[in-house]
Amino acid sequence: MTKTKRIWVKSAAGKYAVVCGAGVLAQLAREIAKVGKFSSVQVVTSGKVWDAVGKRMLHGLGGPRAARVHTFDDAESAKNLQSVELIARRLVKAGADRRAVVIAVGGGVVGDVAGFAASGYLRGVALVQVPTTLVAQTDSAIGGKTGVNLPEGKNLVGAFYPARLVVVDTEALATLPDREFRGGLAEVIKYGVIADAKLFAFLERNFEKLLARDKHVLGHVISRSVEIKAQVVGKDERESGLREILNFGHTFGHALESATAYKKYQHGEAVAWGMMAAALYGHEIRVTPAADASRIISLIRRMGKLPAWPAVPAKRLIELMASDKKTRNGELRFVLTPGIGKAATYDAQSPEKLELIMRLTARVAEARAVLHG
């Protein structure tokens, strides 16, 4: 096992640790023991995730009988209230009481659904997050946001419910399908755009190594992403201001996911499209310099081919954006970057320009020359 890094996250419920490193699942029982003594261990995961990491999980917990395991469909289309009810009922049948701990093992869907179930089960039981995808390890498992989708939009029902502990084992990414890994790089790029110009430049220099899952490059970008997320949510846990910058590209991305019934894109892929749209829109309304918008789009294109922009009218996508959590008094707001390493939320300007960007993003993103001064 490589060196373990412990990153602390401030929360209204008390600070908690994100433990990062290759092989840290082996010390899972010891890490859990540091945060409390629990009457039972209830693992919530999906079948495919458990096939990949189940043996290591149970070994880290102390043996095959150390936990009860509950699986459910972790497709984005199953991120709904029915899945929350399913998990809660299984916890009842397993005899989970108020001193139980729920361990969410998987990607963003598992973390969000299991976390929301834990927040409501018996009015709240302890939660541990064990993210196994790049999106979850760098973003969704940290910060306490849990929730599910409605047909009207993404993440519209949920709760702020921080975990007692987050365990990020980079070795869990070894079995992650290539499409999921590449999609997850969007969140890493996002952190460079919104908060760390040095990280962005590091990604530009080392992107091929990252695609090859070089353990040193991967370890650096994951721990740096966690540090940025921890800094932001520690200052604004409930998304009343600063935390909104973490949604760079997400207003567009969530609309794409909703418009396609959560079946066409993985989350990171939709965010990748959304970040390109945000870069272009920022440039169009004179917030984002052309050179920075070009660098953002160029780096995202190195992720590989994305599922195509949907054949959905621009007006429909804008309607879907109206349900975004950043909307105020019916007015759209977007996270944009005035320069790589910085971000802020801006009120929507010029509906005509927004529609233009929604129609042209796919063409501009595929062009050889992205933008000129």
Image (cartoon, rainbow, N blue to C red):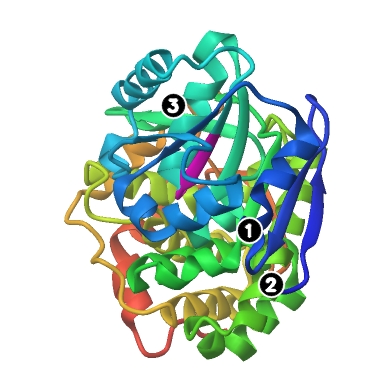
Task: Identify the magenta region.
Answer: 103-107
For the residues bearing labels 2 and 1, Cβ distance under 8 angstroms? yes
Q: Position of residue 235 (x, y in %)?
A: 82, 39
180, 189: nearer the viewer: 180
Q: Quadrant of residue 109?
A: top left
Tell me which residue sits at (47%, 75%) in the image.
300
Measured as percent of width and height from the top left, residue 51 is found at 34, 55
Which quadrant would residue 86 be assigned to in this image? top left
For the point 71% across and 65% down, the residue is: 223
Residue furthest left as drawn: 311
Q: Nearer the viewer, residue 252 or 257?
A: 257
Q: Amino acid at mark 3?
A: Leu
Image position of 30 with respect to 137: above or below: above
How far apart marks 3 and 2 lie (CA) works out to 39 Å
Q: Tell me the mark number nearer the camera, choosing from 3 and 2.
A: 2
Q: Residue at x 23, y 66 (%)?
A: 308
Observer able to see residue 247: no
Q: Amino acid at mark 2?
A: Met
Quadrant of the image for the C terminus?
bottom right
Q: Give the labeled residue for mark 1.
A: 26
Q: Which mark is residue 156?
A: 3
Question: Any magenta on residue 104?
Answer: yes
Q: Residue 40 in the image: x percent, y percent?
A: 57, 25
Residue matched to label 2: 1
As measured in the structure, the alpha-carbon distance from the residue carrying label 3 to the one carrying label 1 is 36 Å
Q: Earlier in the sequence, mark 2 or mark 1?
A: 2
